Image (cartoon, rainbow, N blue to C red):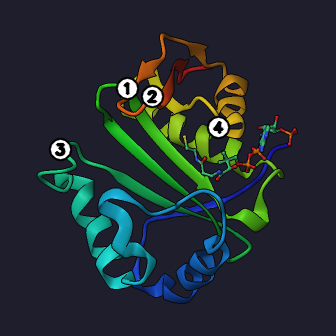
């Protein structure tokens, strides 16, 4: 299924949209904002400022590569968030994505991934590297549908396994 989304950069004018988005995540199994992003749960202004800063500078010392964040809207409802790293995070992740719990399984995740691949292609990057947790069946399915070829897994401390994929941005 092909979904038409409107991609926008994070901005203060989306305060109410983001509040609705955040409330949809409360209680979901996936922790949408962790690591350096944890304050986003309750500090919208901080998060918008962070997104602006990350686009050019990353967020040192934790995030050493720039990160371009997009919010995806479907008829004025914020339904997705996309992270694009033009320099892959840890050498193996160009793109991150999440879809609000109440809007899943209608093709939004696939649309986010495709938009991210196009952004990379526009920058002259022909091969994208993607990762997902070994148990994340939804994310793995998305990547494989986009033509992802599996590379060797990465074993993280604590026994957590990350799948690694290579995807052409030109298909
Ligand atoms: C992963 C995620 C982005 C998928 O978003 P989505 O909008 O539901 O994905 P789509 O509707 O485009 O699904 C495309 C296909 O992926 C597969 N898929 C999606 N969710 C699935 C699930 N829970 N289990 C198994 N396969 C799944 C299906 O084959 C689906 O096609 P179908 O609905 O025609 O059967 C969403 O589940 C999410 O936000 N999860 C939490 C955040 C996350 O895990 N991000 C990725 C971190 S690596």
Q: Nearer the viewer, residue 3 or 139?
A: 139
Tag 1 secondary structure: loop
Q: Hey, which quadrant is residue 144 in on the image?
A: top right
User: Residue 20: x and y, percent?
Assistant: 62, 83
User: Residue 105: x and y, percent?
Assistant: 82, 50
In front: label 2 or label 1: 2
Q: Total number of numbered labels?
A: 4
CA gap between label 2 and label 1 equals: 19 Å
| Earlier sequence position, callout 2 versus callout 3 | 3
Circle 3 residue: 64
Circle 4 residue: 136
The residue carrying pointer 4 sits among few (fewer than 14), some (14 to 19) or many (20 or more) residues within 10 Å by Cα, namely few
CA gap between label 3 and label 4 equals: 26 Å
Q: Residue at x 42, y 70 (%)?
A: 10
Q: Are marks 2 and 3 in contact (CB under 8 Å)?
A: no
Q: Residue at x 32, y 65 (%)?
A: 51
Q: Hey, which quadrant is residue 86 in on the image?
A: top left
Q: Nearer the viewer, residue 163 or 55?
A: 163
The label shown at residue 46 is none
Circle 1 residue: 92
In front: label 1 or label 4: 4
Q: Are marks 4 and 2 in contact (CB under 8 Å)?
A: no
Say whether residue 126 is visible.
Answer: no
């Amino acid at each position: 299924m092909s979904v038409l989304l409107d991609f926008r950069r994070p901005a203060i004018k989306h305060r109410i949209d983001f509040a609705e988005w955040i409330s949809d995540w409360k209680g979901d199994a996936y922790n949408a904002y962790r690591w350096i992003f944890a304050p986003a749960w309750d500090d919208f202004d901080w998060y918008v400022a962070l997104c602006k800063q990350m686009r050019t500078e990353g967020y040192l010392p934790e995030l050493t590569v720039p990160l371009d964040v997009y919010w995806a809207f479907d008829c004025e409802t914020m339904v997705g968030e996309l992270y694009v790293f033009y320099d892959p995070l840890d050498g193996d992740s160009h793109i991150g994505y999440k879809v609000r719990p109440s809007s899943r399984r209608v093709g939004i995740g696939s649309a986010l991934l495709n938009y991210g691949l196009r952004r990379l292609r526009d920058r002259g990057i022909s091969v994208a590297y993607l990762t997902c947790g070994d148990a994340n069946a939804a994310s793995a399915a998305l990547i494989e549908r986009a033509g992802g070829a599996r590379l060797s897994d990465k074993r993280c401390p604590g026994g957590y396994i990350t799948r690694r994929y290579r995807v052409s941005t030109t298909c």
